[in-house]
Image (cartoon, helix red, strand yellow):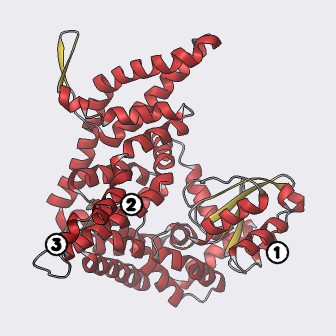
């Protein structure tokens, strides 16, 4: 059936459009809130073609896979007459994966983990734009390379054409306006006025700051600079704007709220941003970039690349990986690409190799089915189903997968391979590799596949692991 028919059938088995309260979609799932759960027939939904699985959680989660879910969600909105939204980050695949993810997510209650979850909610809605803009810039860079007189493939005059200039400009739009989008999403995340968050983002990148250079405050000379603090500065500035807005609004008479609350928010927030937030955020971004790039990759070399790739998945399981998104974007803004992302992307490759090894060694039909469902999206760079549905519940394969990924990370660190945008990993990252190093990235990915496969096949998996896993699962059920 086509996407429209599938959406209609899903709505019918959920009790009809009158029974649907709201819905949203993430990378692989359609998530639906219903009014009366007794009217829902989950078994019939599971039997529909193209439905990979159904998970009962706070919402009914229908696993459709990347790409497919966006199309079905659009048709679902047409069928129900409701406006959908973007859900939080992908959470795994099938029941075992959901249970494992929920257990780890329940532990993410510390202030730093909650903060990093907020960062993820700010940046994840922007990922489709990152990917599309990166691909457009990739095409523009390919034309630039082919128009090189040494290549002799395209006439160099094409670089002066209006179409090429327009193409390159369209690709750069998001990155040139990123502060606005991040500021708006930050205001949304912390329940502030969106336009004020956008103004906070504009302030960080205002060209006038570099023109001024030095501000005098209470007899002190303050150095100001456009872009100081980067996107971390935008997030902090927009957050401060929200807090000021909330403070002022609670004390402002209703008749003056529309006039004075935004005015006070912008004036006070701008002063705090320029004087305090930008220098502080600049120190944070400088420290993170120095450690991850200068120390781990440039000084550490293959050892640093191995360590980063091998430890990335443990960071994912505790929610710390979201904090690296601003670092990637800061590198892209400063040098044109991020060498950190391809190295970290090898972590998913190690999981793919480990899953293949487990599939070949196990005789458990349930585990094989989980791997069959999760492996295609794992190859495309969505690793949660493999992490939470296969390697992490089994234990030892998670360790061998991480170690296997380290070899791919070491190779990419040695070759200084970068990506021109953030978003996907795995095979999906190939078109976004910088400086034409596509083959280098593919070799690194194959190394991580091989590393995860060999280590897991030899040391990481025994049949007894699956038996114990599903035995405990059945008892719990």
- Whichever of labels 1 and 3 marks the residue nearer the N terminus, that label is 1
Q: How many marks?
A: 3
- Asked if the residue under mark 3 is in contact with the one under mark 1, i.e. CB atoms within 8 Å, the reply is no
Q: Nearer the viewer, mark 2 or mark 1?
A: 2
271 relative to 72 in the view: left or right: left
- Whichever of labels 2 and 1 marks the residue nearer the N terminus, that label is 1
User: Which residue, given by chain and number where applicable, does mark 2 sit on?
Assistant: 133
- Whichever of labels 2 and 3 marks the residue nearer the N terminus, that label is 2
Q: Quadrant of the C terminus?
A: bottom right
Q: Residues within 10 Å of mark 2 (few under 14, many from 20)?
A: many
Using the image, tell me which numbered label, if any, was put on residue 44.
1
| Position of 4 relative to 251 (above/below) | below
Residue 415 point in image, percent of width and height: 19, 71
Q: Is residue 166 visible in this depiction of the protein?
A: yes
Residue 314 point in image, percent of width and height: 43, 60
223 relative to 4 in the view: left or right: left
Using the image, tell me which numbered label, if any, was put on residue 253.
none
User: Which residue, given by chain and number where applicable, does mark 3 sit on?
Assistant: 156
Q: Residues within 10 Å of mark 1 (few under 14, many from 20)?
A: few
Q: Nearer the viewer, mark 2 or mark 3?
A: 3
Q: Which residue is at 28% across, 55% downward? A: 332
């Amino acid at each position: 059936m086509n996407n429209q028919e599938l959406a209609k059938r899903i709505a019918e088995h959920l009790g009809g459009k009158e029974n649907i309260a709201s819905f949203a979609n993430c990378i692989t799932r359609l998530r639906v809130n219903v009014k009366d759960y007794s009217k829902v027939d989950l078994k019939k939904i599971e039997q529909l073609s193209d439905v990979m699985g159904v998970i009962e959680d706070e919402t009914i989660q229908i696993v459709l896979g990347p790409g497919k879910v966006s199309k079905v969600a659009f048709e679902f909105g047409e069928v129900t007459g409701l406006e959908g939204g973007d859900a939080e980050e992908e959470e795994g695949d099938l029941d075992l994966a959901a249970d494992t993810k929920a257990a780890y997510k329940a532990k993410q209650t510390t202030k730093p983990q909650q903060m990093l979850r907020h960062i993820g909610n700010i940046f994840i809605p922007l990922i489709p734009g990152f990917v599309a803009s990166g691909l457009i810039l990739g095409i523009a860079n390919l034309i630039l390379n082919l128009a090189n007189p040494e290549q002799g493939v395209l006439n160099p005059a094409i670089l002066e054409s209006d179409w090429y200039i327009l193409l390159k400009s369209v690709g750069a739009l998001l990155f040139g306006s990123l502060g606005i989008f991040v500021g708006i999403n930050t205001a949304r995340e912390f329940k502030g006025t969106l336009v004020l968050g956008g103004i906070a983002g504009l302030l960080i990148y205002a060209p006038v700051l570099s023109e001024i250079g030095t501000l005098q405050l209470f007899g002190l000379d303050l150095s100001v600079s456009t872009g100081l603090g980067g996107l971390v500065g935008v997030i902090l500035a927009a957050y401060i704007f929200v807090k000021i807005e909330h403070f002022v609004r609670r004390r402002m008479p209703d008749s003056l709220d529309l006039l004075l609350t935004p005015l006070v928010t912008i004036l006070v927030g701008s002063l705090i941003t320029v004087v305090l937030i930008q220098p502080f955020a600049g120190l944070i971004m400088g420290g993170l970039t120095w450690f991850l790039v200068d120390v781990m990759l440039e000084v550490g070399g293959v050892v640093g690349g191995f360590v980063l790739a091998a430890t990335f998945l443990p960071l994912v399981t505790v929610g710390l990986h979201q904090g690296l998104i601003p670092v990637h974007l800061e590198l892209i803004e400063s040098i044109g690409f991020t060498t950190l992302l391809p190295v970290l992307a090898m972590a998913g490759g190690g999981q793919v190799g480990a899953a293949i090894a487990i599939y070949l060694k196990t005789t458990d039909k349930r585990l094989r089915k989980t791997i069959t469902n999760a492996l295609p999206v794992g190859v495309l760079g969505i690793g949660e189903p493999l992490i939470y549905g296969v390697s992490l519940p089994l234990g030892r394969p998670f360790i061998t997968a991480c170690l296997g990924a380290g070899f791919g990370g070491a190779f990419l660190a040695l070759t200084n391979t970068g990506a021109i945008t953030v978003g996907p990993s795995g095979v999906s990252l190939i078109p976004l590799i910088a400086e034409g190093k596509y083959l280098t990235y593919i070799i690194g990915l194959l190394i991580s596949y091989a590393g995860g496969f060999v280590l897991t096949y030899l040391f990481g998996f025994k049949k007894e692991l699956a038996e114990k896993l599903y035995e405990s699962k059945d008892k719990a059920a």
